[in-house]
Amino acid sequence: MTTLTDRYIWAATRSVRESQRGDLERELRERIGDESDALVETGLTPAEAERDALTGLGDPVALAARYVDRPLQLIGPRYYLAWWRLLKLLMAVVLPFAALGITIGQAVSGAPIGGIVGAVIGTTISVAVHLAFWTTLVFAILERTPAPADRRGFDAPWTIDMLPHVPEPTKTARRSELIGSLVFLVLFAAVIVWQQFGIRWVPALESIPVLDPALWSFWLPYFLGLIVLEILFAIAVYAWGWTWALVAANLALNVAFTVPALWLFLTGQLLSDAVLDAMRWPWGEAGPIVATIIVAVVIAAGVWDVVDGAIKTARRQQRSRVTAAA
């Protein structure tokens, strides 16, 4: 006839390897017997003492896991930080490239914009799920792989040399600005090239270039060259921070872009005639108002970009003076 102790030991030992069951059973029987005897001395019956002793030991599976040093979580504290850092790195590196690759592939195949967006979202989610699953699985296996007696396992002992350098707060902020600028400029350049083949999701403009094809003789390559200079400028701001020389360079780039773009727009050389006909421009009396709003918005954006750079430069120099004085 099986007792509560027999059932408890069976539940505990069946969750460990065969080679560990004998030792675990002997240790548990001794521990249960000692605690039961101690409870009997307090006045409990043997049956009551056995029940209270087993209740105090808790879940037999959890007890066995503690005995063999096996964590009951997917990723335990030993490898958690390594797993989390690697997962974030993979997400930051792999997902953008996956999305970009799908976008290019769908665009080359002539998919509509809705199909491109859907494919990018679906594939990106799928890649993210796979990254999280397989990375977690590897670390879960490592967590449950016993290490040799003279080694810690996958994680290396921490040393003072592993301390990371503390990044400058200002450079951390500039990194976000750099990423945003690069993404915008690359997309802007792609749009300039892509518009030549029409707007596929607008039936009236499906095969009509948005910008006048005659601009490819000079102006469109000129604007693409300015975008390259803007990319170099963004990298320079990230590397050195805002200076008055970069403020002057930013002013020159804004003037070099805004003045020709507005001149082409106001003289009717920017958009192709087919697009203007499809849009039924100039929309009667509303045409001059719309044109004025566009010009004002473009000029305001350029002026704010220059002023923002000047403000950041002044603040940086002020902080430098305060630091030097301290």
Image: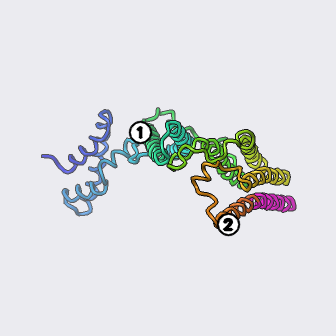
Q: Is residue 130 magenta?
A: no
Q: Nearer the viewer, mark 2 or mark 1?
A: 2
Q: Residue 129, how many percent across, how many down? A: 44, 44
Q: Residue at x 72, y 63 (%)?
A: 296
Part of the protein shown in magenta: 303-326
Q: Is residue 152 above or below residue 264?
A: above
Per the image, label 1 sits on a secondary structure element best described as loop
**Quarter of the image with the C terminus in it:** bottom right
Q: Residue 247, how many percent across, how many down? A: 82, 54
Per the image, label 2 sits on a secondary structure element best described as helix
Q: Which residue is mark 2?
A: 289
Residue that sits furthest to the left in the current view: 1
Q: Residue 86, how many percent across, how many down? A: 54, 42
Is residue 15 left or right of 93 when viewed as pictured?
A: left
Magenta span main SS: helix
Q: Which residue is mark 1?
A: 144
